[in-house]
């Protein structure tokens, strides 16, 4: 007997990816407002852990797509982190772009959480669109 998803669970995976993408974009935007920059971390972590908790309601195919999304997200994240590290090293040695380097150094936690959410939302929407 095939278990049919309830109506509220039918589009749960796509809507969660949209929420994660929104949290990432919101987090990046809030990094430029000094008084609420920590809000990016909280919004991103809430959305990320909500996705983890609700993923138990996904069927097997959606679980595979979610795992592929996680994998691709963290592959892109390591590339972005390596490029950023290279940029910081070059800017330090050549004494250029000090403002950008200072911004990255003071906002790196919020930016990483926001970038994870954006990448996860984009790759998830791409994978779940193909479903």
Image (spheres, rainbow, N blue to C red):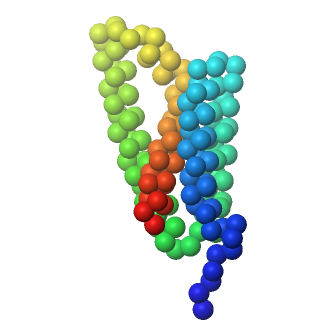
- Residue at 44% across / 16% down in the picture? 100
- Residue at 54% across / 20% down in the picture? 106
Q: How many numbered marks does the figure carry?
A: 0
59 over 31 or under it: above or below: below
How far from the left and from the top, in percent, is residue 62?
52, 67
Quadrant of the rendered image containing residue 15:
bottom right
The residue closer to the viewer here, 34 or 78, is: 34
103 over 120 or under it: above or below: above
Quadrant where the N terminus sits is bottom right
Asked if residue 89 lies left or right of residue 63, the reply is: left
105 over 51 or under it: above or below: above
How far from the left and from the top, in percent, is residue 120?
49, 48
Asked if residue 120 lies left or right of residue 55, the reply is: left
How far from the left and from the top, in percent, is residue 21?
55, 44
- Residue at 34% across / 7% down in the picture? 95
- Residue at 47% across / 47% down in the picture? 122
Asked if residue 115 lies left or right of residue 16, the reply is: left
The residue closer to the viewer here, 93 or 24, is: 24
Residue 70 visible (yes or no): no
């Amino acid at each position: 007997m095939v278990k049919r998803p309830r109506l509220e669970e039918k589009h749960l995976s796509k809507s969660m990816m949209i929420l994660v993408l929104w949290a990432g974009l919101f987090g990046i935007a809030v990094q430029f407002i000094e008084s609420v920059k920590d809000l990016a971390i909280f919004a991103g972590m809430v959305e990320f852990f909500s996705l983890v908790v609700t993923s138990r309601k996904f069927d097997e195919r959606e679980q595979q797509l979610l795992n592929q999304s996680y994998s691709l997200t963290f592959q892109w994240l390591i590339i972005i982190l390596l490029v950023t590290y290279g940029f910081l090293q070059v800017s330090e040695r050549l004494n250029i772009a000090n403002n950008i380097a200072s911004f990255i150094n003071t906002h790196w936690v919020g930016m990483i959480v926001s970038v994870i959410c954006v990448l996860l939302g984009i790759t998830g929407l791409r994978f779940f669109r193909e479903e």
